[in-house]
Amino acid sequence: MQVKIENSWQQVLQGEFEKPYFQNLISFVKEEYTSTEVYPPGRQIFHAFDECPFDKVRVVILGQDPYHGLGQANGLAFSVAEGMRTPPSLLNIFKEIEADLGKPIPRSGNLERWAEQGVLLLNATLTVRAHQAGSHQKKGWEEFTDAVIKKVSDEKEHVVFLLWGAYAQKKGLIIDDKKHLVLKAAHPSPFAADKGFFGTRHFSKTNVYLREHGLPEINW
């Protein structure tokens, strides 16, 4: 199966695209886009990969679902399309960056600027029905994104994985923490940020680790 995705990822994931579960998943997703309102826009389903080629991945941030409100999702975990109001979880991420690194909170919640530096902003599920959180879970996306995480873990070295919340932390079982840095914290949502996200200084810790291994820091 030919999937429209960035070339380096195409090569790394081609075996996954050929598996029956993925073909069933794509059939389901195509039917959903035809019959109902689904986010992100179809051309942005693999936006996280297109903006961050496999060979450039230095950091992985795991999310769960795309935003399910009109015009929000742009295919990058925690990110919103240009011009959209910054959602609460992302605002808390920006607050932690401000406290950690002294950087002012940006006006834009579009995180393409991170992706272009090597931050893979990966949701476990890459599509969702409008206004129905979790509606595309357990259709095959999780198996696909688990395979993505395993490829990064197995074939690269010195990648920082930021696992926020119980859902993301479960995926840590796939990651080889002997050759990568795995940082865990509470989810940045308003319901959990005060219980172990604020004050973790994950962003400065990420840059220290990258610097120690001769890799460029992320301009958060």
Image (cartoon, rainbow, N blue to C red):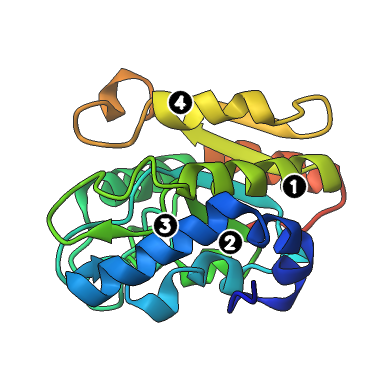
Q: Position of residue 148 (x, y in %)?
A: 65, 49
Q: Is residue 138 left or right of residue 144?
A: left
Q: Which circle, 1 or 2, is nearer the viewer?
A: 1
Q: Residues within 10 Å of mark 4 (few under 14, many from 20)?
A: many
Secondary element type, mark 1: helix
Q: Which residue is mark 3?
A: 126
Mark 2 vs 4, N-terminal side = 4
Question: How many angstroms separate mark 2 from mark 3 (CA)?
Answer: 25 Å
Do labels 1 and 3 touch, CB within 8 Å?
no
Question: How many angstroms separate mark 2 from mark 4 (CA)?
Answer: 21 Å
Q: Is residue 20 left or right of residue 89?
A: right
Q: Which residue is mark 2?
A: 219
Residue 212: mark: none
Mark 1 vs 3, N-terminal side = 3
Residue beneath the point at 51% across and 69% down: 46
Q: Which circle, 2 or 3, is nearer the viewer?
A: 3
Q: Which circle, 4 or 3, is nearer the viewer?
A: 3
Quadrant including the N terminus: bottom right
Quarter occupied by residue 56: bottom right
Q: Position of residue 6 (x, y in %)?
A: 66, 76
Question: How many angstroms separate mark 1 from mark 3 (CA)?
Answer: 17 Å
Q: Which residue is mark 1?
A: 151
Residue beneath the point at 67% across and 30% down: 174
Question: How many angstroms separate mark 1 from mark 4 (CA)?
Answer: 23 Å
Question: How many angstroms separate mark 1 from mark 2 (CA)?
Answer: 25 Å
